[in-house]
Image (cartoon, rainbow, N blue to C red):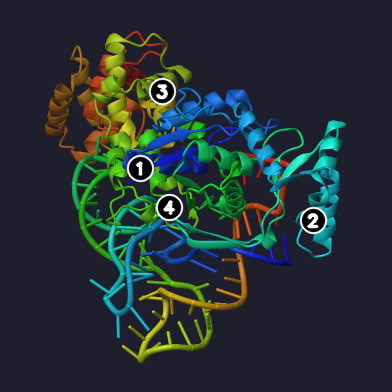
Amino acid sequence: MSSVRVRFAPSPTGYVHVGNARTALFNWLFARHHQGQFILRIEDTDVERSRAEYESQLLDDLRWLGLDWDEGPDKGGAHGPYRQSERRELYGKFARQLIETGQAYYCFCTPEQLEAERQAALEAGRQPKYSGRCRAIPLHEAERRRASGEAAAVRLKIPEGIYRWRDVVHGETSFSSEVMGDLILMRSSGQPAYNFAVVIDDYFMQISHVIRGDDHISNTPRQLALYRALGWTPPQFAHLSTILGPDRTRLSKRHGATSLENFRQMGILPEALRNYLALLGWSPADGKTEILSTEQLIAQFSLDHITKSPAVFDIKKLYAFNRHYISQINVGDFDRDAALRAWVEQHLVDVGYLERPINGKLSEWLFKKLFLILAPSVDRLDELSARASVVFNYDAQAMMERGPTRDVVEQPGARQVLQAFISKALAETELSGERFRAITKEVQKETGKKGKELFHPIRVALTGQVSGPELEKLVPLFEEGSKLPLKKHVKSCAERLREFQAAAKL
RNA sequence: GGCGCUAUCGUCUAGGGGUUAGGACGUCAGAUUCUCAAUCUGAAAACCCGGGUUCGAUUCCCGGUAGCGCUACCA
């Protein structure tokens, strides 16, 4: 089969939105599945809105998502340059060619004039499309007017007829030329217009499949008209459905987190987002498996299994995937994944628990103990600091003033359990998980209390909270943490229990 | 207004002329755990409406409705 070349062509006008991220992902998966090329092209023809700093943000976002490209603005390639702003001559050349062959013409109408006509047409209930007035201006006259300094745009004469293509996801699709006005190729500023630049670029970059949002469906016939005028064979088109917010309108900022940057800050793992996004509009061959590694995604991805209908973005489901991938993190991953390590460090530095440098024993404790004990219960990693409160914040006085914790301590029998436990625990120089277990066994024998009656008061005395991870894991976490040079001191079990004794007047 | 796209549990989806309409998230219940989370088991939950074709339509066709998109010298 001929080689697959696909592209992701964002304009640098802000952060990368999930909708675009999904488009990028589908292109990438398709390219990787077919061992083809994935090309990144920057569509910065809109000088007003494009900003250079957005471009580097954009590349960072895509890298974070785990997508890599074979050709792009930062790495070049045989079909560059990869910024439309650097391809001006090309567009100019073909605009002139189309004018010379009579397929395009100069248009001297001003935007104000066009807007007025548009409004008038709308009010009269007519189709608001360009009248084609400037088609009648002879070329030599147009040249003369331009020479005298008059600004002109270039328009394509849309040939009449039906424009049809076989969309890879929608099947046979067609539009009549009647609904299209002569489209702008070059703006009077000399900048190419989107539909023109896209066609030129896709052709010269030898794009085989254009996989993009279905908001481009009605642009497709215009582009087809251009391919026809230029005598070029168009690529295959695949139009992906829109991603909607919970209210079924197009997903946007007002729906909350929608940019890759947002998700990164929330502590969504890129593999979770990739997996979730892949399932928005695409489904695996067996129709059932949802947790899929990137390798499996690449192996199974096919344009045949794409749905046409729009999808509502469900953050709860994203969280479920994120929980899954967080629970898969194990000790070794921190050695491999510097980005994950840096994220966790920064997060805890930001809340004032830690300070840099973080290395040696502290790093070990942080990743191999604290993280692995606390992370499995979070939806997103930015909840880690709140979970870590059990480690860093212990205040016996406050605990005795709060209803839920105080009630546990004041339950009948609780003091008996606590007295026995505390005297034994304080006799130890350091409490290990094993010693903790042994001591609670002894307390159980002596007091006859077990289960909830036994552990609940101990949990409250040791953590100041009524729920949390297993005590057997927390105890050594506290003990080890207490010996580390942390910005915020972690109280040892002994410190906690003495403070508790005083506050509870035991 | 015109043109186009879309329509299966609350949500993401599988499926397809005859099925107990499958899976996942969420929800609810139970099990387990010192607690929460996790985990396991189970339950409730869907073919937009109206015509047509057919022995039989949720599936195919037409129409309606609704949602979304385009209708720019934005992309």
Q: Position of residue A56 (x, y in %)?
A: 53, 24
Say left or right for B53 vs B3. Answer: left
Which of the two discs, 2 and 1, labels the residue nearer the N terminus?
Answer: 2
Which of the two discs, 4 and 3, labels the residue nearer the N terminus?
Answer: 4
Which of the two discs, 2 and 3, labels the residue nearer the N terminus?
Answer: 2
Q: Residues within 10 Å of mark 2 (few under 14, many from 20)?
A: few
Which of the two discs, 1 and 4, labels the residue nearer the N terminus?
Answer: 4
Q: Is residue A80 above or below residue A271?
A: above
* Secondary structure of the residue carrying numbered label 1: helix
The residue shown at (82%, 43%) is A111
* Secondary structure of the residue carrying numbered label 2: loop
For marks 2 and 1, give the CA distance.
53 Å
Q: Amino acid at mark 4?
A: Gly
Disc number lying in front (1 or 4)? 4
Q: Position of residue A308 (x, y in %)?
A: 47, 58
What numbered label is drawn on residue A281? 4
User: Which residue has dot 2 on it?
Assistant: A131
Q: Amino acid at mark 2?
A: Ser
Q: Amino acid at mark 1?
A: Phe
- Indicate the chain on which mark 2 is placed: A
- Indicate the chain on which mark 3 is placed: A
User: Which residue has dot 1 on it?
Assistant: A321
